[in-house]
């Protein structure tokens, strides 16, 4: 499987894995799966941390690279096609971070690990977190 992590799934996977469903934890731990962390999630974490809405043990610019090294998760940049695909998405969800993650999952043909039920209406395969 090729899995894209929603931002909250990334944070829980590292800080509170017990928050994740058993299926999600097993999928993330299975070395046969490719697990991706989007630059979108890095951007969201950096913004929330700068507003004081997210407490992490280190600044995002150190925390995220360390998480990627320790977990073996791969980073996924935002390409032009994914950014532009957002325009055609229905307005089922207003969060710009989630909309871009949906566009990436569609464009890259990734399974999206999330607990956000609002994302079900986009037709993207989801891994319930």
Image (spheres, grey):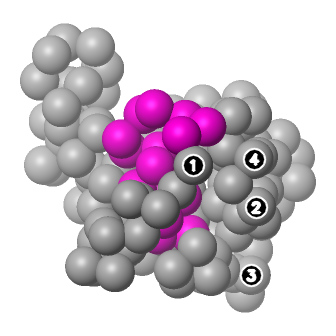
* Camera-nearest residue between 84 and 49: 84
As measured in the structure, the alpha-carbon distance from the residue carrying label 3 to the one carrying label 2 is 17 Å
Labels 3 & 1 near each other (Cβ < 8 A): no
What's the mark number on residue 121?
A: 4
Report the mark closest to the observer, 3 or 1.
1
Labels 4 & 2 near each other (Cβ < 8 A): yes
Report the mark closest to the observer, 3 or 2.
2
On the picture, is 122 further left or further right than 87? right
What's the mark number on residue 123?
A: 2
Identify the mark nearer the N-term, 2 or 1: 1
* Camera-nearest residue between 5 and 123: 123
What's the mark number on residue 90?
A: 1
Identify the mark nearer the N-term, 3 or 2: 3
**Label 2 crowd (10 A; few <14 / some 14-19 / many >=20):** few
For the record, the magenta segment spans 91-105
Residue drawn at x 28%, y 37% is 45
Residue 98 in percent (x, y) is at 47, 44
Determine the secondary structure under disc 2: loop
Q: Which residue carries the number 3 mark?
A: 1
Labels 1 & 4 near each other (Cβ < 8 A): yes
Residue drawn at x 65%, y 60% is 112
**Label 3 crowd (10 A; few <14 / some 14-19 / many >=20):** few
Identify the mark nearer the N-term, 3 or 4: 3
Relative height, residue 70 to residue 16 (above, below) = below
């Amino acid at each position: 499987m090729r899995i894209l992590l929603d931002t909250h799934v990334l944070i829980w996977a590292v800080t509170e894995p017990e928050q994740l469903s058993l299926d999600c934890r097993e999928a993330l731990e299975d070395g046969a799966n490719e697990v991706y962390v989007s630059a979108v999630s890095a951007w969201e974490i950096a913004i929330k941390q700068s507003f004081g809405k997210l407490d992490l043990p280190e600044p995002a610019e150190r925390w995220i690279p360390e998480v990627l090294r320790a977990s073996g998760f791969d980073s996924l940049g935002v390409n032009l096609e994914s950014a532009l695909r957002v325009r055609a998405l229905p307005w089922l969800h207003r969060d710009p971070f989630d909309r871009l993650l949906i566009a990436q999952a569609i464009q890259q043909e990734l399974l999206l690990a999330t607990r956000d039920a609002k994302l079900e209406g986009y037709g993207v395969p989801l891994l319930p977190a």
